[in-house]
Amino acid sequence: MQQIVKVCACFLTGALVAACSNDHTRTVMTAPVAISRASDGSAQGVPFTEGLASSRWQELARDTLGPPHKLASVENGRIFAYLGLAEYAAVVAVDDQDPLAVESDNAPAGQGIGSGGRTRLDMERGAIGGAAAAVLKSLFPSAVENALIDARFTAEENAGPGPSRDAFTTGAAIGRQIAEPVIARAKNDHFYDVTTRVEPSGPGHWVSETSQPPVLPQVADATPFFLSKGSDFRPGPPPAFGSAEYLDSLQAIERIADTRTAEQIRIANFWNGGGPANFYVIASQMIDRYGLSEREAAHVIALMNMAVMDAEIGCWDAKYTYWFIRPPQASRLTNLGIPADPIKTVFAVPNHPSYPSAHSCIAASSAEALESFSVFSSERAALDSMVHEAGLSRMYAGIHYGFDIQAGQELGRSVAKVAIHADSTRGVLSVLP
């Protein structure tokens, strides 16, 4: 018999503790979560057309704050994960408040936090804004970036019709307090520690071909959210360099490069454009399509992005365990016994080893997390198709072997299943003290 487990968290004397929440209800491991379409302020006759605050804060990180830094996909994944965690923790904390503690004496009937009215809406948006602004300022500390974050917060505070936003201000204070343990966790996750991993030498090993060091090998030893360590799902080694299996895989990429079509180039460029950000856009579109509430959307975003960060840590562990050569490097070698011109890639080759494919780790973990929510059950085939295309895109580009893709997809889905199980049994907020 399948066991139904309810888990959640609430805000009590400054701490997150166990409580109950319908948006966490899952059938452990196998059945996806049941998400309802909760009402917002507009359901009580209070027009509000700005959409979900959680999505707008993620867009700020993705489209405005991150691009000037030209961050690696693994760095963006970390930002989205901590931002999503803070947003969800904040909205859960607000929703678990006693309505009488935040309801003003003259609030119209039906607009209190308990019935999903405007007070609740402003409290949730304020909490998300307070938490998101605090986390983003810790990750983007320059004065210019802080000004952009403050401008976003002010826009949120002034959004929608009506008088002063007392509920928003109350929610923002809660959000800022909720952000503190999230920020502390980020500061101690060892993501940017000095690595002890040493680049090997010998045939079949990848080497950096630029003046820059390899991309963040220390991420392999960062602290995951749900895994015990990055090596929990380390794949077995790739085919032996120079073996018949390896040469077949290399020649397959050479054939693609020699016959590459305009459509293949388009697909390669599309999926190269954002790593985890691509699936965040996909998730946001699905959240809008199915009319999820602020809390439900924040739950989806948090679980997906936290699963992605763990998958990236696992991916980096494998990359900097095997240090496997990229197809373009191998195609320039003269001792493999295969007459071929060097592989021409669609874009610059990422400065980290080939095996496994990070894009496949990211895509598969994202899709697995999204597919665990029953509200998205009809999207499974489309999501699986996107994972497949994201994998093919790296082969079309000439930068990955087929076995890179397969290993990345298996790792990503395995990691996401651990995250889903953790959410089912204790909730994603259990990663916070």
Image (cartoon, rainbow, N blue to C red):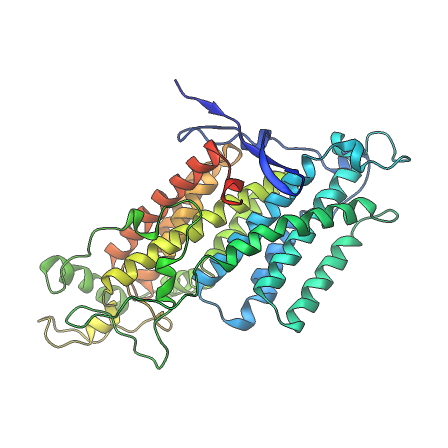
Q: Say whether residue 9 is left or right of residue 245.
A: right
Residue at 70% across / 46% down in the picture?
A: 174
* Image quadrant occupied by the N terminus: top left
Total numbered labels placed on residues in the image: 0
Q: Say whether residue 99 is left or right of residue 306.
A: right
Residue 357 in sight from this viewpoint: no
Residue 31 in sight from this viewpoint: yes
Q: Say whether residue 169 is left or right of residue 299.
A: right
Q: Residue furthest front?
A: 13
Front residue of 95 and 50: 95
Q: Find residue 134 and report its horizontal and vertical position in percent.
A: 64, 57
Q: Find residue 354 and report its horizontal and vertical position in percent.
A: 28, 63
Q: Say whether residue 186 is left or right of residue 101.
A: left
Q: Residue furthest bottom?
A: 211
Task: Tell me: residue 176, above or below residue 4.
Answer: below
Front residue of 245 and 425: 425
Task: Tell me: residue 138, above or below residue 420.
Answer: below
Q: Quadrant of residue 400?
A: bottom left
Task: Tell me: residue 182, above or below residue 294.
Answer: below
Q: Residue furthest right?
A: 106
Q: Residue furthest top?
A: 1
Q: Find residue 407 and report its horizontal and vertical position in percent.
A: 27, 51
Residue at 77% across / 32% down in the picture?
A: 99
Q: Quadrant of residue 207?
A: bottom left
Q: Find residue 181 and report its horizontal and vertical position in percent.
A: 57, 51
Residue at 36% across / 52% down in the picture?
A: 361
